[in-house]
Image: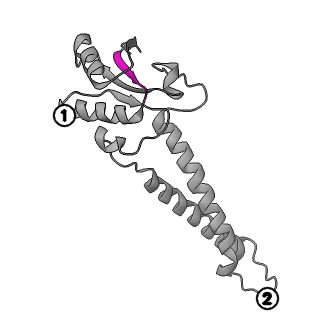
Amino acid sequence: MAAKRLVYGLYNDEEILLEAVKSANEKHIDIYDVYTPFPIHGLDPLLGLSESRLHIAGFIYGMLGTLTAFLGMTWIFTKDWPIIFGGKPYWAVPSFIPITFELTVLFASIGMVVTFYIINGLGPGVVNTYLDDRITDDKFCIAFDSNSMSDADAEAFFRRTGASEVHDKEL
């Protein structure tokens, strides 16, 4: 994989960052990425990001858990081990509800965590590159690919929009 050179500016405040992103959108500048130490309300629409489909995956995993629990208990109590206890019939659906609920939640939560890790490239042994240590602490960052604009243009943009520092890094 070829190294990618990024030019990035660090901002001290999220409001200044939002204004800088708006300015970049007005000038039709392609933003490589925006890094923040915490989620910023209203940043996703400015970057053109769509809503996550993780909740759809969660629903599918939950339904898989529901079917696993319900069909498993149906098979166990009617075919594999049919025992009448407490005067209940073999197929006592109301008694299946607690286990069905628990497996629904278990499958949905584990499935969503695994899906999230796979999609975002996280997990054990993964070495992630980063631009600046302070981005996870107290700085906000906009990064541009150096192929999309010159260093002088990027530095002028960052100075005009109130960036406290401008750097470049090869990833």
Q: Is residue 149 left or right of residue 111?
A: left
Residue nearest the observer in this picture, 110 or 41: 41
Amino acid of disc 2: Gly
Percent position of residue 10, x then y: 40, 22
* Residue at the spot 67% in from the left edge and 74% down from the top edge: 96
Relative to 145, residue 151 above or below: above
Q: Residue lying farthest right?
A: 86
Can residue 48 be seen?
Answer: no
Magenta segment's dominant SS is strand
Percent position of residue 117, x then y: 53, 38
Percent position of residue 26, x then y: 18, 34
* Residue at the spot 45% in from the left edge and 32% down from the top edge: 36
Quadrant the C terminus occupies = top left
| Residue 166 figure quarter | top left
Q: Is residue 128 left or right of residue 15?
A: right
Q: Which residue is mark 2?
A: 87
Name the secondary structure under disc 2: loop
Amino acid of disc 1: Glu
Q: Is residue 162 left or right of residue 107?
A: left
Looking at the rendering, the stretch of residues picked out in magenta corresponds to 5-12
Can residue 71 be seen?
Answer: yes
Disc 1 crowd rating (10 Å Cα; few below 14, some 14-19, many 20+) is few
Q: Which residue is mark 1?
A: 26
Q: Earlier in the sequence, mark 1 or mark 2?
A: 1
